[in-house]
Image (cartoon, rainbow, N blue to C red):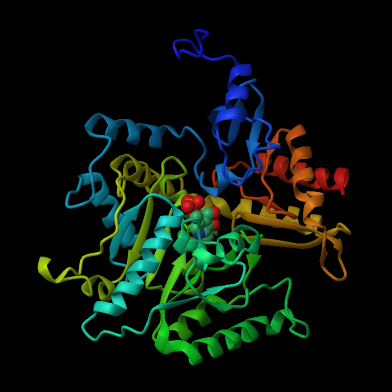
Amino acid sequence: MSISQAGSAAPSHEELRRWDRERVWHPFTQMAEYEPFIIERAEGCTLIDIDGRRLLDGVSSLWCNLHGHCRPEIDEAIKTQLEKTAHVTALGQSNPTTIQLAQRLTTLAPDGLTRAYFSDDGSTAVEVALKMAFQYWQQRSDPRPRKQKYVAFANAYHGDTLGSVSVGGVARFHAMFHPLLFEVLRAPSPDTYRRPPGVSREQACEYYLAQLETLLADNADEIAALVIEPLLQAAAGMVRHPEGFLRGVRELTKRYDVLLIADEVAVGCGRTGTMFACEQEQVSPDFLCLAKGLTGGYLPLAATLTTDEVWNAFLGTYAESKSFFHGHTYCGNPLGAAAALASLRIFEQDRTLEQMQPKIARLSAHLARMAEHPHVGDVRQCGLIGAVELVRDKATAEPFPWDEKRGMRVCDYALTQGVWLRPLGNVLVILPPLAIQLEELDQICHAVEQGIAATI
Ligand SMILES: Cc1ncc(COP(=O)(O)O)c(C=O)c1O
């Protein structure tokens, strides 16, 4: 055994690459084709690999980094917490940092979201909301025990645990697990680009709401909750919903007595230009799920916010067993909570939402230019989320075959320009940290544009 294998000296780059290829199983990655790509450090919006190569982070470390990497304020907050304690269980115990985060989040959140349940990641935030909604109907003062089903949208993505996969609708990821999943009532994806024949963009909102209303009207007595990614379906390819759709969904769920779960894992925490995406349509859901950017992209922490109405259904004596019997070892971890509080302070100190406005406008200008390309079928934007969909035929929106890896090819080109991106199939995603500078945003967009020109 060499010294480095025994762990007493730093491994060589070659060893790291070999171990990475042979020992580490990467998520959503074909390991037979995996080429090690090892980031050692990061500064601001730049990632630095073990060879010292500098890459602009065009996708915010998978959609979670907000204020740049190594922000001194967040680093300090974590260190300060670390000097107190790294872990306090949330099962029957608490800690000052997590309490303050609950207080802060419920103050910032849309009206009525007064209670915060903390877990670890986006999937668990959704899983918690699904289970709470189920249990709510079973044990509220006027129980409705038949309400056990969920409504979700085609092409939805809510995470990878079995409950969140059940409500998910991306066949490529989810079809394999079908025998393990619970049944879900599926509404059509409220897609403004690929619409049913004869439905114009202007008619799309009304059309999709009418479809949903039929589903709710026919099944309301059995539906516990509807789960939606507000404003856009992220993993589906940043699929934009028609304006007014979310508001319509809120109205319908109220009318048919169905709880509304807003999964803001991807779109929350400032990403769309407001702190919460629901604000853009003046919607207060019954559950709001947050993760990804909650800690500024530093540590795993998630929150499921809910209402007094839901909370009250879980109150009773110990003997009544009405508690929420769900919890994870690291629920409400104080290091994550310290990072989240520091991130929220940066929003105020840097006036992040205001500072985003020129960046959002600059992204729009870049996307408008890219839309002219003969193989760009659609460009989509929501705040600092940009998407460019590559198609074989612009007139019919016929996609390029999946296995041609068109998106990946553009991203490989972007790497040669010092920009790291990760596509969603044929959809190029531009989702930089909110702290991106205008020149950096230009560099990212130019890399995408040149990548399209070079590879399509
Ligand atoms: C809308 C949405 N919900 C849930 C998740 C799952 O989050 P996590 O990967 O943190 O479990 C994601 C992840 O991309 C997401 O986009």
- For residue 386, side relative to residue 70 (left or right): right
Q: Position of residue 324 (x, y in %)?
A: 25, 64
Total number of numbered discs in the rendering: 0
- Camera-side residue of 192 and 7: 7
Locate residue 296: give its quadrant. Answer: top left
- For residue 151, side relative to residue 453 (left or right): left
- The answer to whether any part of residue 379 appears in the image is yes
Q: Position of residue 295 (x, y in %)?
A: 41, 45
Q: Residue at x 73, y 80 (%)?
A: 196
Locate residue 440: give its quadrant. Answer: top right
Q: Residue at x 43, y 62 (%)?
A: 126
Q: Residue at x 64, y 64 (%)?
A: 171
| Residue furthest to the top | 3
- Camera-side residue of 170 and 211: 170
Q: Position of residue 303 (x, y in %)?
A: 36, 56
Q: Is residue 144 above or below residue 364?
A: below
- Camera-side residue of 212 and 238: 212
Q: Residue at x 86, y 45 (%)?
A: 455
Q: Is residue 280 above or below residue 336?
A: below
Q: Position of residue 129 (x, y in %)?
A: 38, 66
